[in-house]
Image (spheres, grey):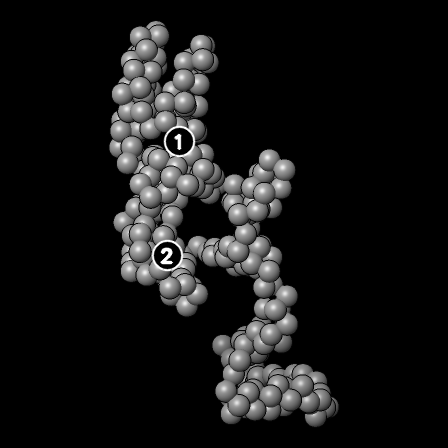
Amino acid sequence: MKQIGKRRILTGFHVFAGFDRKHVLELLEAYLDNHYDLSRCTVLSNSDGGSGYTKDVFDKLAEGSQRHEHFRDWYHVNEKIRQWLGWVRKRGMVDRLHHKLWQHDLEGVHCCLDMLEGETSTAEEEENVRKLRAYLERNWEWLTPLPLRNGLEDCRKGLGTCESNHRTYTYRMKKQGRRWSYRGDLAMVKVISGLKNDDLEQALAGDLCVMPLKTRKEYRNAVREALKKPIFITHVGAHQCRIANYGPSSNPMGQLAAALNW
């Protein structure tokens, strides 16, 4: 982590992106095995908890590690609060809820939600408070801040938000009237990932397709033959044919011949 002014920038990271989640996870697992001795590492994971990105997925990636700590992404937690408490007029109550969440005070969170529930004036607002309460209770284990976890008290800074790492993709590819084909979309994702990983130039300078020597020679010969100038053959033109009729033109054969000649 590098500090620039008040901002912190993650260093030494490696990005994997694609449309096949299973394939991307396989690449990530292989990268971890080849670059880290997980038995000596504490793995910190962070996700929004969506389908395919639950804690058990990261548990599999962190197998063999010394310790694995999973977190719920704070960007999405704050987004849920904004979504379900947008009707609250007394913003101090929402700020107090944020403070209790950061202190990981479940009793204090329930107290704030009880107060907010008392401020509701419609059934929809009451339902939104109920949804937020259920969401926080469901994810409470992973909402523990980094400094409050056993053995990590010296880590005064949190993980930040994983959502900010997506902006390079979203700013380039969304909400600007662009349309992408599958191949074009995937190519742009790979280019952006190459720039973030600082290996795009290396990938472009290398061979795009490495073929065995025998196959490469056969391919080269086929291309050479296809590029040779073909032998020009004089075109003799179209031949005009007709049905011979040796009888009167009124008979069926004569009528057919007259029709075709016309």
Q: 219 or 47, which is in the foreground?
A: 47
Which of the two discs, 2 and 1, labels the residue nearer the N terminus? 2
Asked where in the image residue 185 lies, by quadrant, the reply is bottom right
Q: Is residue 67 left or right of residue 200?
A: left
Q: Position of residue 87 (x, y in %)?
A: 42, 14
Residue placed at 45% from the left, 13% from the top?
A: 92
Q: Is residue 31 left or right of residue 203?
A: left
Would you name the residue on which mark 1 appears? Answer: 77
In the image, residue 45 sits, relative to residue 256, either above or below, namely above
Q: Where is residue 71 drawn, in percent x and y? A: 36, 41
Q: Is residue 233 shown to the viewer in this render?
A: no
Considering the numbered disc 2 on the image, is that residue within a helix, a strand or a loop? loop
Residue 9 lies in quadrant: top right
In the foreground, 151 or 202: 151
- Specify whether residue 214 is in view: yes
Up-down: is 57 above or below 259? above
* Along the viewing direction, whichever of 109 and 218 lies nearer the viewer: 109
Within 10 Å of disc 1 (Cα), the crowding (few <14, some 14-19, many 20+) is some
Q: Secondary structure at mark 1?
A: helix
| Residue where numbered disc 2 is placed | 41
Label 1 amino acid?
Val
* Amino acid residing under circle 2: Cys
State how far apart marks 2 and 1 are (Cα): 27 Å
